[in-house]
Image (cartoon, rainbow, N blue to C red):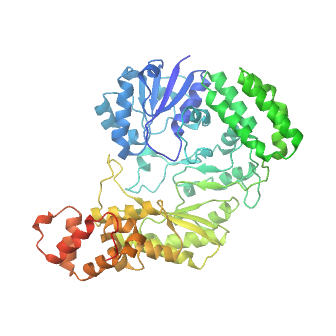
Amino acid sequence: MEKILLVEPDYKNKFPPIGLMKIASYHRGKKDYVEFYKGKAPYTAIINFDRVYITSLFTFYYDLSVDTMRHYLNHMHKDSVYVGGISATLLAEKYKKELKIDNVITGQLTDSSLIGYKDSVNIDELPLDYDILDDINYKYPIGDNVFIYTTRGCLRGCKFCAVSRLEPRFEDTNHIVNQIKTIRNKYGDKRNVFIMDNNVLYSRELKKVIQDLNSIGYIRNTPDYIEPNYFEIMLKKIERRKEYNNKYDKQIEELIEYLNKFRSRVKSGKLMRRLNEILNYINKEGNKIKALKEARGETIEILEKYRFKQKLQRYVDFNQGLDARLLTEEKMKIMSNIAIKPFRLAYDNIDGEKAYKRALNNAYSHGVKYFSNYMLYNYKDSPYDLWKRLYNTIILYENKLDIQGFSFPMKYAPIDMTNRGYIGKKWNKKYLSAINVILNVTKGVVAKEKDFFCEAFGANKKEFIEILTMPNQFIKYRTLFKKSGHIKTWKRKYNSMISREKKILLEYLCGLIDKNKIKNKKIISIIELYSITMPRAKI
């Protein structure tokens, strides 16, 4: 038996480390000891392991990832450290040179021989091990869902996208039914499924994918999901962790806390007294697992009487987005048999307007009510192109009152760049920082309400450019600076400038001109407003 440590660098991320969860399943199948750590484990813990697998995410986390990997290489032989994931695939040679290691695994882990084993297991097709997520305190925002692939790769080959290097071949890999049934049997039912395909609409098996989802409860307008009994789920988890020799004190505490909170739902005095007796017994008993198992029957009976058991709709999320250009009427008719929430469409350039509008209207006509739009910017587009796409979406939603929708602008950076500093040819440093401020205020999304959009981004191109040029503090605290009169003053000064003066101001704001070299009084006067961090008295 080997001792295996799985590591994810300490960056913030929405999704759990799917690759590591598959590696965990592989090693559990070999009866190995598996533990997961986020960040840098202490030396005293590292030396107990035979192997370390370290994942990587986006290339702009390169420095953090390398720092984490060095930490483990300082305490283990380099032949026992394996590095993989997105960044490691895209920058494999850079990682090898920087870390002086050979064990950089690129792409999908389709054969266990890639990590030195002779059993020829396709690790990429294994079900996920959700138990490792309980080894850490970090909570992934959407970690409690089913994550699957039905296809790999994409035939588009877009230059801005890394998929052609991460998954160079497009192929169907549909194992939906077995994957989801395995997860339900072991970890309990999960309501929603996230399909991580890069372009599922290229699949020749799309109809089968939808039929498979239907066969296991994912049917539109047919509530099928009942939240499983938490006590049963947690007790099984604790028993598994004991079997794996993983710590389980935290899970016991969480289960006892749940039972304490559940008492507020119990209406029967008799059952309340019995639940209190059970809790007292569990708290006094030294062997908590023994106590929980002995109380299992009565506890479940009480919980079943009062817990939430309403049937809920199961949703499917094609998380990487659906290709508007491929969304035909026939394909949409097939997909209308499942509840998709949200329906994600890419609207990455202004030339895609026709296909985007057609796809959205197509989906809406088949009953879709929840939309999310991916919008790439800072690539070949101009700032106005981004505004126009956002505005087009707002107008498209305007007469569809029953729609819930939002847009999600995504800043482009070259796929091999190790920081977020890239500036597109038609963009500049000030405009990008202003967009970032606006999106931080709106938590990264642009809602469908027209009034809100016009306030945040402007009602036309002129207002949009004004907002992008405005001091970032004025953008961030728009209401306060309006009340104080600072925004009115800034607009008066800005609109009094001629084009050449505005150009010089923008060059200064982008760090291209030193303030001491500016002699124009109007420019100097407006620059003074950029040093204000919070509103003063009304001016």
439 sits left or right of 515 in the view? right
| Residue 217 percent coordinates (x, y) | 74, 51
Residue at x 41% of width, y 57% of height: 158
Please name whichever residue, 382 or 446, is drawn nearer the observer in this view of the structure: 446
> What is the quadrant of the N terminus in the image?
top right
Q: Is residue 32 above or below residue 269?
A: above
> Taking the image as drawn, is residue 350 in sight?
no
What residue occupies the far front of the structure in this picture?
537
| Residue 356 percent coordinates (x, y) | 51, 70
| Residue 286 percent coordinates (x, y) | 71, 20
| Residue 221 percent coordinates (x, y) | 75, 61
What residue occupies the far right of the structure in this picture?
270
> What is the quadrant of the C terminus in the image?
bottom left
> Taking the image as drawn, is residue 363 in sight?
yes
Q: Is residue 336 above or below residue 460?
A: above
Residue at x 54% of width, y 40% of height: 18
Residue at x 53% of width, y 42% of height: 16
Please name whichever residue, 518 or 46, is drawn nearer the observer in this view of the structure: 518
Q: Is residue 200 above or below residue 181?
A: below
Residue at x 50% of width, y 70% of height: 355
190 sits left or right of 168 in the view? right
